[in-house]
Image (cartoon, rainbow, N blue to C red):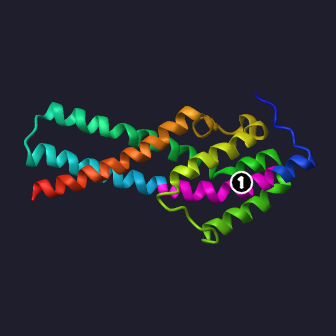
Amino acid sequence: MSEPPSTPAPDQKKRLLDLFGRILPLVDGMADKLRFVLVIGVLLLIWIGTWLLVIKHVALGISLVVIGLALLPLLILLRFWWALEELKDLPNIAGQMMGDAKDEIRESVRGIRAGDVSKLNFVSATKGLWSLGSMLKDSRELLGSYISLSTLVNPFMLILGVLSLGSVLVLMVVSIVLVFLAL
């Protein structure tokens, strides 16, 4: 059995509350945008697969290889989305760390869910990944083992995330070209 976590000092509580206040709106906006990009990416893959198999009658093996390679960026983005969804549970994590700060953080989350925070647009999603990564580096020492931040803090994964977002944009352009070729 692991021992219960110790309660942070009052200055750490204030620092955590300030950090959560900055991170939660960004996490919520990024998670929504990544979910949208993932849905669009899956729909584009379905279209490309349909174009390859049904319209152009490309061999099944080649079509599966093309679709599999185009699926890799979506899998990387799925990992980011999963990590961001994990971070949305910060009020419960903070409740484990410090009992009395839990209500203040929940109020922040309620405000976010009520739409009091502006959302990120698609173009600023890549900038948001870098901003989130730098903020989470600060919180890694405070959160410790409560949550896994490796995907969002690791520079290699951040680069892969940005490249994956760019790949989905390229996938969108390719799909538009394929629509014109199908006509």
Question: Residue 85 placed where, x, y %?
Answer: 56, 50
Q: Which of 39 and 182 is in front in this view?
A: 182
Residue 115 location, quadrant: bottom right
Seen in the image, is 103 located left or right of residue 168? right
Q: Residue drawn 72% across and 63% down?
A: 108
Magenta segment main secondary structure: helix
Seen in the image, is 133 located left or right of residue 34? right
Seen in the image, is 120 located left or right of residue 176? right
Q: Which of 125 and 150 is in front in this view?
A: 125
Question: Residue 91 placed where, x, y %?
Answer: 71, 54
Helix, strand or loop under label 1: helix
Q: How many discs appear? A: 1
Question: Residue 26 placed where, x, y %?
Answer: 62, 56
Question: Residue 37 placed where, x, y %?
Answer: 41, 54
The answer to whether 92 is drawn above or below residue 140 in the figure is below
Q: Residue drawn 63% across and 49% down?
A: 131
Q: Magenta segment range? A: 16-33
The answer to whether 3 is drawn above or below residue 50 in the figure is above
Q: Residue drawn 16% across and 31% down?
A: 61
Residue 111 location, quadrant: bottom right
Seen in the image, is 42 located left or right of residue 90? left
Quadrant of the image containing the C terminus: bottom left
Q: Residue drawn 51% across and 37% down?
A: 159
Give yes or no for residue 17 being in the magenta stretch: yes
Instruction: Residue under label 1, please give it.
Output: 91
Mark 1 neighbour class, 10 Å CA radius: few under 14, some 14 to 19, many 20 or more: many
- Work out which residue is located at the far top of the displayed protein and give it: 1
Quadrant of the image containing the N terminus: top right
Q: Check disc 1 and give the amino acid type.
A: Pro
- Work out which residue is located at the far right of the displayed protein and give it: 10
